[in-house]
Amino acid sequence: MGEQSVRWGILATGGIAAAFAADLVDLPDAEIVAVASRSPESAAGFAERFGIGRAYGDWESLARDEDIDIVYVATPHSAHRAAAGLCLEAGRNVLCEKPFTLNVREAGELVALAKEHGRFLMEAMWMYCNPLIRRLTALVADGAIGEVRTVQADFGLEGPFPPAHRLRNPLLGGGALLDLGVYPVSFAQLLLGEPDGMSARAVLSDEGVDLQTGALLSWESGALAMLHCSIAGGTGTTASVTGSQGRIDIPDGFFHPERFVLHRDGRAPEEFTLPPEDGPRSTFRHEAREAMRAVRAGEQESPLVPHDGTLAIMRTLDALREQIGVRYPGETAAA
């Protein structure tokens, strides 16, 4: 495909889609050629806002548009399986928002579809593509803090969210764990892999979704991860990785950090910051660039966000939901 512009379609028109589109507009090698919504009016308004040539009032038309190189799926995660599956079956490459799906069964179905049709598929886990997170991961892998002993991470929103809000709606996969807890879980598994054991407790809403969840993950190495997520109180969104010879602290916004501090035994602390050319912190450009690189290269998955890693995270989220008793409509168990 060379280095020509990668042509994007955007499926859904909510806040996350708008933020992603705003970053794509700033990439010289990206072009948004179409947008789709189940509301023609919403699609038209989004297209006008971002200067997009085609606006579809249904998902199918976008999926069938052969001028599109890759589709960004930005629906609520309860619709990820349907939306991403539709695009893959039509021959489109897909970047799908996190959490990847409601459960690992749906995630496995999407991975199988991507392989069947020879298409690229990636979870939009922007944290994994962030330059500072990649630097942190490399430092840990190189033994900068010795053997990892503990990981701590939290993500909470202040709220309160009314019962009708999507974060409390079981039909939309509501609750803290899938929407926010996916980040602490993904952070821990980035460093330690899939856990060997876990326990969790939660406070559930009247609708049956978790308002906050605390989890303890364990590994045969002796490492532990203490994770928390909440839609009932704002937290510092901090993270810390402690090893046998030091510690790394992310003081705020750990899933898209501007800085972290490395503490090595016997040495002065070292601060690592996001280079100006990689900012601002809230950018989606890093994951978009990785997806475009992979599509140009003809790859079916990204080494930064591989399918096996996404499936492992979904298995952990399923197991945690099993423990806290959160079920979504149509599920007989956390599949």
Image: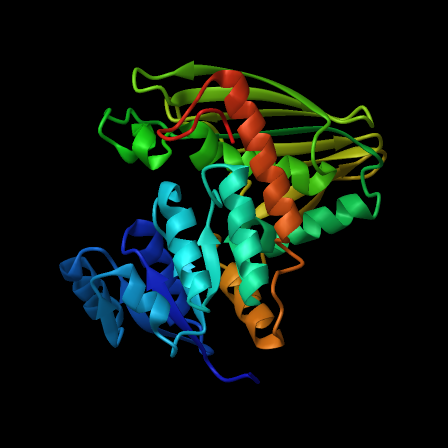
In this picture, residue 169 sits left or right of residue 224: left
Tell me which residue sits at (75%, 51%) in the image.
138
Q: Nearer the viewer, residue 148 or 122?
A: 122
Foreground of the two, 212 or 117? 117
Between 222 and 58, the one lying in front of the other is 58
Residue placed most toward the observer, 98 or 90: 90
Q: Is residue 256 visible?
A: no
On screen, 14 above or below 243? below
* 202 horizontally vs 160: left or right: right
Say which residue appears at 30% left-offset and 71% top-offset. 34
Residue 66 screen position, x and y as percent:
39, 77
Q: Where is residue 193 in the image (x, y as percent from the top left)?
A: 72, 38
Q: Quadrant of the N terminus?
A: bottom right
Q: Name the quadrant containing residue 35.
A: bottom left
- What colouring style does the render use? rainbow
Residue in the image at 67% along x and 58% along y: 303
Q: Can residue 205 be seen in this view?
A: yes
Q: Which picture quadrant has residue 119? A: bottom right
- In the figure, 151 relative to 107: above or below? above
- Snapshot quadrant of residue 243: top right
Residue 103 percent location from the top left of the image = 50, 36
Q: Residue 212, how many percent across, how many down?
A: 44, 21
Looking at the image, which residue is at 27% across and 69% down? 50
Total marks drawn? Answer: 0
